[in-house]
Amino acid sequence: MRAVIQRVSQASCTVEGQITGEIQTGLMILLGIEETDNTEDLQWLAQKIINIRVFGDENGLMNKSLADVNGSILLISQFTLYAQTKKGNRPSFIRAAKPTIAIPLYEEMIVMLESLLGKKIATGIFGADMKVALINDGPVTIVMDTKDKENF
């Protein structure tokens, strides 16, 4: 499982002209799911997301988590995070999980993040053509991969 986590002052997702999710201060997360991902990957990543300290304290240091700033989450499914570009100019997405695997894990991630955060999170629509807008605060952008846990 791979996540691109961006600290935002606001973010939204629109599908066919309708806003499906929007937040103010918080994290906008692009989530890619690989064929070999499982619940263990999901639990590890959810804990890291909830507890990562990327929000400024009174001294301007990144010492606060989502809970500390009463932040929100906008979660967007993003199979293109598993693009392979080694050959040619057209990316291959064969490592990205098929919907039969990805949808249940994506939905489980929503439930887990809501449980850990203690409130509803905003989302896009899995597989839809989404328009995502955000104001990256900092900018702060962090990439996490459950297959590379020792670096996180």
Image (cartoon, helix red, strand yellow):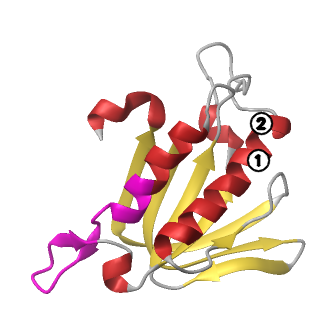
Determine whether 58 is above or below 118 in the image.
below
Which quadrant of the figure has residue 145? Answer: top left
Q: Residue at x 64, y 25 (%)?
A: 36
Residue at the farthest top position: 87
In the figure, 68 relative to 152: above or below?
Answer: below
Q: Residue at x 64, y 30 (%)?
A: 83
Q: In this view, which residue lies farthest toward the left?
A: 59
Magenta span of residues: 47-64
In the rendered image, which quarter contains the N terminus? Answer: top right
Whether the residues at callouts 2 and 1 have beta carbons within 8 Å, the answer is yes
Asked if the stretch drawn in magenta spans residue 49, the answer is yes
Task: Identify which amino acid the numbered label 2 is placed on.
Answer: Ile
Query: Which residue is pictured at 29% across the width and 74% down the height?
Result: 55
Q: Is residue 9 visible?
A: yes
Q: Which residue is mark 1?
A: 104
Q: Position of residue 27 (x, y in %)?
A: 47, 69
Element carrying mark 2: helix
User: How far from the left and from the top, in percent, is residue 39?
Assistant: 59, 40
